[in-house]
Amino acid sequence: MKTKKKKVLIVVGGGISAYKSLDLIRLLKKDDFEIKTVLTKSGKQFVTPLSLVSLSGNKVYEKLFDKQNEAEIDHISLSRWADLIIVVPTTANLISKLSQGKAEDLATTIVLASNKDVFLVPAMNVRMWGHRATQENSKKLITYGYKFLGPTEGLMACGEFGSGKMISPKKIFKEIKKYFYKRNVVKNKKFKALVTTGPTREYLDPVRFISNESSGKQGYEIALALKRQGIKTTLIAGPSNLQFEKGLKVIKVKSSEEMFKAVKKTLPVDVAVCTAAVSDFKPSIFQNKKMKKNKKRETISIENTIDILNYIGKNNQHRPKLVVGFSAETENILQNSKNKLKNKNADWIIANDVSKKDIGFNKDYNEVTVIEANGQISRIKKNKKSFIASIISEKIMNKLLINDKNIN
């Protein structure tokens, strides 16, 4: 695959691995990429501006405020010029700054102002990479949409061995090529997704209803993550206090019946992710007037609501290529979820334990197990729902593209 005139902005960070950015530029230029570079103050200790100019064929940018280019506003013009931004190497210090949203020099200001994907290529001592602060900062950046390449294990310049070594320029080059290929495939195929989220309300009378504690946060984060992947995403949301991001198509519903109708209207799609905690029961009769208290207790008759996941999974006419359901359980998590996977004819079931106080319903954190129809099981440890959504969305994208051999 020959990529034509894709524009990559390379931010050269500090650290002995900075010299490897020169090899990366050579590889990209050879493949007809257009390159511009930003040299950080610490990066200048390892790489000269002259070497970057010679290899990239373009000016090197260093200062946040450059009187010679004052009208251009470099941090905006560069971030808009690039199709992709890559920070190589990315130090622990730079990871920390980005996780805090700092914009104190040209490099951090460009990244913060960017509307493009940003690749971070970590390189640091094994202890620095393994430090809890660095790990927490990295996880936070993943939830912001940053993509990490590496690090890997190996012998470092300091003489220690372990994880923290920067991946090779050839591997970085391969990942950049893969990124642009996948982006073109997504653009050409115009993938569509629907995500259901939140609770439903099944009204007994004008003021009372059957519902649950779902906040809709996990489904919302998944919808955002899929949208960032370039997938045209529709979020069908039950009642919640969420503030929806502009640009995301949201259909607001209340009852399971309304959600079902919205799902049917949204089909066909390539992937359906059913995170909504749809009420299993609804009153058989809706009372038009508020039910009054009296000494004699009334019996409320209930019936089953429509099973939306079951409908999607067994839809012969408009079944998505990938059907993903969520299983909120309080006991026998794996077995109940496996049963649900089979019974609903889903491709994946994502199980979580809603009996725990610090994860699940109405919480910012979650811990899930992805169970696939082929028997594969993978766990995502406790983390923010936004982080879990980024992992799930990446997994979904890879599944959609799995049949295309050119991306591997």
Image (cartoon, rainbow, N blue to C red):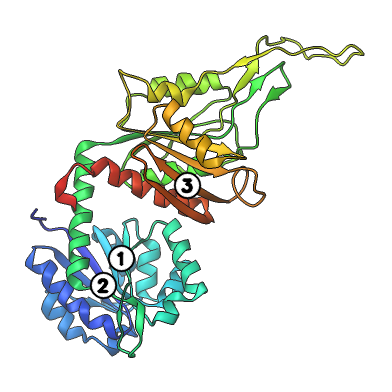
- Report x, y in % for residue 388: 46, 51
Q: Marks 1 and 2, how far apart in space?
A: 7 Å
- Residue that badge 1 annotates: 149
Q: Marks 2 and 3, how far apart in space?
A: 29 Å
- Mark 2 vs mark 3: give the one in front: 3
- Quarter residue 86 falls in: bottom left
Vertical arrangement, residue 375 with respect to residue 255, above or below:
below
**Label 3: element kind:** strand
- Mark 1 vs mark 3: give the one in front: 3
Q: Residue at x 56, y 28 (%)?
A: 278
**Label 1: element kind:** loop
Q: Nearer the viewer, residue 31 or 399?
A: 399
Tell which circle, 1 or 3, labels the residue nearer the N-terminal end. Answer: 1
Q: Marks 1 and 3, how far apart in space?
A: 24 Å
Q: Nearer the viewer, residue 315 or 109?
A: 315
Q: Nearer the viewer, residue 120 or 347?
A: 347
Instruction: Indicate left or right for 34 with 101 as reference.
Output: left
Q: Nearer the viewer, residue 264 or 4?
A: 264
- Quarter residue 155 falls in: bottom left
Vertical arrangement, residue 289 with respect to residue 202, above or below:
above
User: Label 3 sits on what residue type?
Assistant: Thr
Q: Residue at x 45, y 56 (%)?
A: 143
User: Label 1 sits on what residue type?
Assistant: Leu
Query: Is residue 100 visible in the rendered structure shown here?
Result: no
- Residue that badge 3 annotates: 369
- Residue that badge 2 annotates: 167
Instruction: Indicate left or right for 32 with 213 as reference.
Output: left
Tell which circle, 1 or 2, labels the residue nearer the N-terminal end. Answer: 1
